[in-house]
Amino acid sequence: MSELVLVLADADATLGLGRILAEVLGRFPTPPALLLTGELGSGKTTLVRGLAAALPGGGDARVSSPSFNLVNLYPTRPPVAHFDLYRLENGGLDDGLLDCLLEEPGLKVVEWAERLAPDCRPAETLEISFRPEGAGREARIAARGPRAEECLQLLRSRFTT
């Protein structure tokens, strides 16, 4: 599994990564899911805010952490299903949420993905782990699956040119 490590100086840089992800993922009819990990306040929701805002219809998306209802759906094109598993205790999702994560078209973004049971993980994923780095944060992006690898290569080309 290959990975890309980025140092994001501040929240604006995290929003920028979200915008670039929207551009890259938007190239795929069935994009890989984004699985986000990191402590509270590490930038997960900020990344989703940048991603949703960059998509058509993003001006109508009110991105917030969906901690109390597990998933928010945003009226973007493609649609974004934003999961937050912070309050999930047993690692599994009910059948309706699992179908949304695994079957429905659109972009899937999962915060607190470490709480997702292995059998609930999509086959194609970009896994982004956030950790503090100085005044900003480090984003470690790993790909699982051929489409995700292609996305990672496109991301790498955006940050190394």
Image: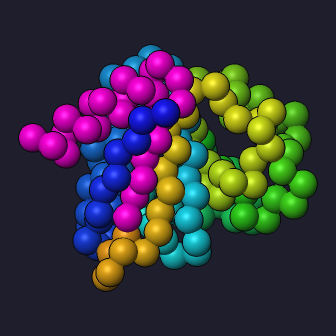
Residue at 69 percent of width and 23 percent of height:
103
| Residue found farthest to the left | 161
Asked if the magenta segment contains residue 152, the reply would be yes
| Residue found farthest to the front | 1
Residue at 87 percent of width and 60 percent of height:
89
Asked if the magenta segment contains residue 82, the reply would be no
The stretch of residues the image draws in magenta is: 138-161
Q: Position of residue 39 (x, y in %)?
A: 58, 72
Q: Can residue 5 be seen in the rendering of this structure? A: yes
| Residue found farthest to the bottom | 135
Q: Can residue 54 be seen in the rendering of this structure? A: no
Residue 10 placement, left or right of 93: left
Residue 98 placement, left or right of 73: right
In which image quadrant can residue 150 be found? Answer: top left
Residue at 56 percent of width and 65 percent of height:
38
Q: Position of residue 107 (x, y in %)?
A: 52, 34
Q: Is residue 125 above or below residue 116?
A: above
Q: Position of residue 47 (x, y in %)?
A: 41, 57
Residue 161 placement, left or right of 59: left
Residue at 9 percent of width and 41 percent of height:
161
Q: How is the image coloured?
A: rainbow
Q: Position of residue 157 (x, y in %)?
A: 19, 35
